[in-house]
Amino acid sequence: MLDERAAGFFALGMARTSRRPVVLLATSGTATVEFAPAVVEAALSRVPLVVLTADRPPELRDRGAPQTIDQDHLYGRAAKWYAELPLFDDDALTAAHARSVAGRAVATAAAGPAGPVQLNVPFRDPLLPDGSLREPRVAPVGEARTGPGAGAEPGAGTEPGAGPRPFAAAVAGRRTLDPVDLEALAARLARAERGLILAGPDDDPDLPAALAALAEATGFPIVADPLSGLRAGPHDRGRVVVRGDQLARPGPWLEAHLPDLVLRTGAMPTSAPLVNLLVRARPDLLVLDGDDGWREAAILPATFVHADPAATAGALAAALSGMAAGRAATWTRDWLDADQRADQAMVAWLDEVARRGEAFEGAVWPVLAAGLPDGSTLWAGNSMPVRDMDTWLPSLDRAIAVRSNRGANGIDGVVSTALGSAAVAEGPVALVVGDLSFLHDLNALVAARLHDLSATIVLVNNDGGGIFSFLAQASAMAPDAGLPEHYEELFGTPHGIDVGPIVAALGGEHRRVTPAELGVAVRASIGRPGVRVLELRTERARNVELHREVAAAVQSALSAAG
């Protein structure tokens, strides 16, 4: 990678997709600071990174030496662990210490909650390797070892049929509840008359099937965030509510369907209406978090269950075994019926928009859902793309991994993250991103060319920051308030850039598409080598009106059904 900020997010995408720690390396000075945005995202999204920050030797620090800054605990509390290695010499104990610290760093990054660690590594001149750059051979058990580090690795080596054992490793298991605590939780679920399972963003591949089993045992519906893993896959999706963002909006239907208990997994949901639903209902709130987290941004009374969510959900399902399902049947049927009515209203409305030939940003997601094969990875940029994905991504029987950088909710590094994912993913990778986020991370396309990567990028270009058109700033600075020019300057931020020549210069393919052409273009792109940017132009003000139209159509459908 030619740029450290892009490299940080590239590594983040690799780690998210592989579910294994990825190592970052930079020279000393400001290059190490460029990793900071990705380190922060990794900390909040619980992604394992090992950040190696090369440094000048101790005697040159704080003396005005070039390319020398204070790198001690450079990433602050965003790093799970920090250590500085000694200057390397020929002492066997130095080599053993370095290998032990490296093993601990990898294990710490991977341990729950996963996250970034920093190892600061000072060097003296000359900065040249003193031997082969190939991985050193580890002697088999029983074979004599000589040279630096000899005798410092008791038990290291190989076993029949196995690879070399690491110098330092850790073994950890999933946390489970005591039977008494499990029984108490099951009793709370059994007593609930109007229970919901709210599945927030989560990458655990075992969680969807476990929550589906719990939904069957309790009879509760599952309101599934698009990043939860519950909307797409071979697990039972019979109780999965997809249009929760629309159902949770204020109206008569919601007032009649406030839950008395909510079991929540993963991070906070993408949907603001769902968060507001929790605040409005103030239910008995159970938050399952196996990594000792306290993620509850609505600041409600809650019981935090610090045990593995998938294992706990499975154990609760076994303990309840249908005891509460009968009582919750009507309640769940109401949610599922409303979900179906909302879906029908949205599909009909979207068909009408298509007949009018209008470019609507939410229409991207049904197109991608129809065009991505089993085993694909679908990324969403922050701001409007991830919110539109929440509203419009349907339920799918294909195993599609749905991802977004929702730790810090930043728009930077999104393209790099998706391309890092493409570097290790087994299936096709697609990304939907806004124009400002795309411009933030254009040099990510250099990595795609250098590493021969393939991805389909749908660029939703509304020439600025579309999310603010939905917020208070738009009305506060509207023309009748006398401040429209300041709104565009501070929040709309139009740029007028033609990205086509830039994409071509960086080695990608670019194509402007109309709404009618998007589906064909996506299907033609998926699976082909190289990076293609399919640009859909939209208009910010009209996009707000269209979003309000579909919300009104859903509320009308819910009211008509009583």
Image (cartoon, helix red, strand yellow):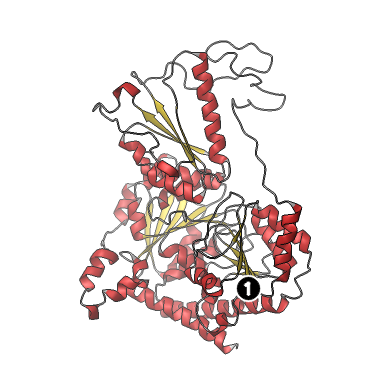
Asked whether, in this view, residue 397 is left or right of residue 479, the answer is right
- Can I make out residue 404 in this image? yes
Tell me which residue sits at (48%, 13%) in the image.
91
Asked whether, in this view, residue 58 is left or right of residue 210, the answer is left
Tell me which residue sits at (54%, 35%) in the image.
106
Viewer-proximal residue, 350 or 192?
192
Quadrant in the picture for the C terminus = bottom right
Which residue lies under the disc numbered 1? Answer: 260
- The crowding category of the residue bearing disc 1, from other C-alpha atoms within 10 Å (few below 14, some 14 to 19, many at least 20), is some
Looking at the picture, how far across and down is residue 120, in whole percent? 41, 30
Three-letter residue code for mark 1: Asp
Looking at the picture, how far across and down is residue 416, in whole percent? 42, 48
Viewer-proximal residue, 11 or 124?
124
Looking at the picture, how far across and down is residue 440, in whole percent? 33, 52
Tell me which residue sits at (26%, 74%) in the image.
477
Viewer-proximal residue, 1 or 21?
21
Tag 1 secondary structure: loop
Looking at the picture, how far across and down is residue 239, in whole percent? 67, 69
Viewer-proximal residue, 96 or 284?
284
- Above-or-below relation of 453 to 378: above
Query: Within the image, what quadrant is residue 3 found in?
Result: top left
Quadrant in the picture for the N terminus = top left
- Can I make out residue 216 in this image? no
- Please count the marks in the image: 1
Query: Within the image, what quadrant is residue 69 found in?
Result: top left
